[in-house]
Amino acid sequence: MKNKYKIILVKSVIAIGGMLFISSLFLGITSEMLLYGSYNDFFNKLAYFLLFLCTIDTIVMLILMCKIDIRPEKAKPMRLKLKDNNYEMIKENLCQKYEHNGYRKLTKYEYNNAKIDYMIRQNHSVVSLVIYIRIEKITEELMYGFEEHIFVEQILNLEDIEPKDKLDITYLIAVDRVTPTFSKYIERNVKQTFWTTVLPVGISLASKTLYISTQEEGFSIFRYKKMKKQFIMDIDELLEK
C-alpha cells in the first residue's frame, strides 16, 4: 500500500473516532439535561453506544499505528568526522566511557566473518546493550542479523537474561568503506517497537566518518534522542572540531 493511502486510512480512522467521541459527549450531556423529553432515555443509550464504537475505533487506530508505517523509508543520517580511523582505539575509548556508566567489561562474540564485541548493563527493568561489529563490508546476512535482532537474542541467551521491560540497543558497525549495503544500513529511517529502542551507528574507516541513523517520529522518539545525545557525548573527544 502506498504511503498516501496509508495516510488517508489512518486519518479517516482518527477523524471517525473524534466524531464518535464528540457526538457521544454531546448526546450524553444533553440527555442528562432532559432536553429530549420522552426520548431522553433513547438518546442516553445512543450516547453509550457511540462511546462503545469510539472505543473500538481507538483500538483499531492503535493497531494501525503499530502495523502501518507511513514514514519515508530513508532519512538523512547525522555525519560526524573522526580524528582517527583506528577502530581498536575508538572501541577502547568508548568502552572506558560505558564502563564508567555501569556497563560490564567488553565480551567477545564470534559470528562467521564478523568480529563482534558487546557490553551489557542491567538497570532495574531496562537492559542496555552496546554491540561493536568490525567487518570489511556489510553483508546481507549481517543486515538480517541487525534487522531481526539475531545478535541480541543470542547474546541475551548467552548471558541468561530475559528482558522484563525495556531493551536499549546501540549498534556500532565499522567497515572499510561505504558500500550500497552500508548506505542502506545508515540511511534507513529508524523504526522502533514499544519495548525496544535502537541506535544504529556506522563508521567508514577509509573516510574517517561516523554516521548516526535518524529516527523521524514514531515509538520511543524521546528515548532514541536520549541515547543519541549520550553517544555523541561519549565519543566527543574523538571527533574533529
Image (spheres, rainbow, N blue to C red):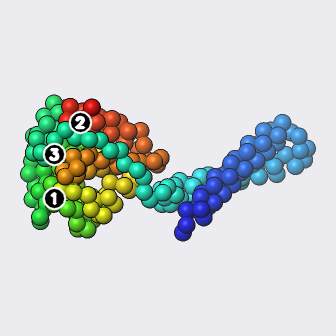
Q: Secondary structure at mark 1?
A: loop
User: Quick check: marks 1 and 3 in contact, CB under 8 Å?
Assistant: no
Q: Report which residue position mark 2 lands on.
A: 239
Mark number for residue 135?
1
The N terminus: image quadrant: bottom right
- What is the three-letter code of the residue carrying label 1? Ile
Q: Position of residue 167 (x, y in %)?
A: 29, 46
- Give the class, few, some or many, for how many residues have Cα within 10 Å of label 1's Cα (few <14, many ≥20): some
Asked whether the beta carbons under mark 3 and mark 2 sit within 8 Å of each other, the answer is no
Residue 122's spot in the image, x, y percent? Answer: 21, 40
Left-right relation of 129 to 186: left
- Say which residue appears at 27% left-offset and 32% top-offset: 241
- Who's the residue at 77% across and 52% down the image? 46
User: Which of 182 and 100 lies nearest the eye of the viewer?
Assistant: 182
Earlier in the chain: of badge 1 and badge 3, it is 3
**Residue 230 horizontal/vertical position (percent):** 29, 34
- Horizontal relation, residue 22 to residue 80: left or right: right
- N-terminal of the pair, mark 3 or mark 2, is 3
> From mark 1 to mark 3, how far is it between C-alphas?
14 Å
Tell me which amino acid carries mark 2.
Leu
Q: Residue 127, can we see it?
A: no
The residue sitting at 90% across, 47% down in the picture is 38
